[in-house]
Structure formats: C-alpha cells, structure tokens
Image (cartoon, helix red, strand yellow):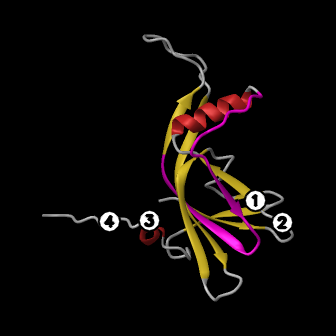
Amino acid sequence: MKKVKITLKPNSPGRKFYLFPSAEALYVWACALERGEQVQVDGMQEIVLEPGGFIEAELRGFDYAYDEGVKPGTIPTSVKGKRLDLVRLGKAHETQNASGTEVSTHMGWVMGTMLPMKRYSDPHIDVWPINEADGKLDLAALFNDEPVIIED
C-alpha cells in the first residue's frame, strides 16, 4: 500500500482536508467547482491538521471519472479524466493535559491535489512517502482489519 505522512510546517496555523463519502460525490463537487458553482455534499468530512499533529494516510484504491460523454461505438479523441483516490488515514495529535497521543480515523475519497499521496510541499504542509516500518500509526489495527487466512 502507498502510504504518506503529512506534517505542518513551522508557523503554519493549520490545514483543512476534505474527505468525500463516495467517488460520485467527489466528482460532482469537483465539476461544480470547475464551473464556479457551489454544491453541498452530505457526509463530507472536514479534517483539521493543527500544530503538533500529523496525518498518516494510505491509498486503498482509485477510480477514474471522465468529463466528456463518450458515445457507444466511438473512440474519443481527447477525453479529460479525473483520478479519484480512496484513502484511509489516522490523524494524531499530542494531548494537552495528559501523556500520550490522541488518534482519530477517517476514510473517504479525495483527488491528488486535495491530499497528495506523493512527495509534496507548499507553504503549510510537507508530505513524504513512508513504509510500514517508518509509520507511527498502525492503520490496520486502528481500522480493525481482519487477518487474511490462506488455506491450503
């Protein structure tokens, strides 16, 4: 699985990320945004990364959605598509009044510009790929993944 860690840069007040409940909801929202329209999406999650916290996100799958309708039996000459990523993540934050780390889990659909799943940096965040050994969060345990039993 592709996994990244997201941290805030020093002096950043925080960063919001949005997860959509379905690929269709994300696609409708993205198309409306391109047209300059606003669309309400039921079930959209807003995740706020605050100073002192971090996110570990894992790509679970993806889908492609195409902007232009393709007529049956024809070959499109130029079809613009959007890649929609299904991710799950753990958002960690050090608690203020007790020792330890508070972790919340989230799952939903994003596009690459919304939650980059590759090396990325901007004025507020740093994102870099990690492997299981480098991760601080055990997403499989946090999401109660069932072990796979292979029978002979």
Task: Examine the rendered structure and indicate whether residue 116 appears above or below residue 57.
Answer: above
How far apart in space, not on screen, are marks 1 and 4 (Cα)?
A: 32 Å
Residue at x 63% of width, y 56% of height: 118
- Which residue does the numbered mark 1 point to in the structure image? 15
Few, some or many C-alpha atoms within 10 Å of disc 1 (few <14, some 14-19, many ≥20)? Answer: some
Instruction: Check the image and name the residue furthest to the bottom.
Output: 99
SS under mark 4: loop
Label for residue 49?
none
Q: Is residue 55 magenta?
A: yes
Q: CA distance from mark 4 to mark 3?
A: 9 Å
Name the residue beneath numbered marker 3.
143
Amino acid type shown at disc 3:
Phe
The span from disc 1 to disc 2 (Cα, nearest Å) is 8 Å
Q: Does dot 3 land on a helix, a strand or a loop?
A: loop
Task: Name the residue nearer the viewer: 92 or 124.
Answer: 92
The reply to whether the C-beta atoms of the residues labelled 1 and 2 are less than 8 Å apart is: yes
As shown in the figure, which amino acid type bears the numbered disc 2?
Answer: Ser
* 91 sits to left or right of 73: right
Residue at horizontal 49 percent and vertical 11 percent from the top: 71
First to last magenta residue range: 36-61
Which label number is shown at residue 146? 4
Kind of residue at disc 4: Glu
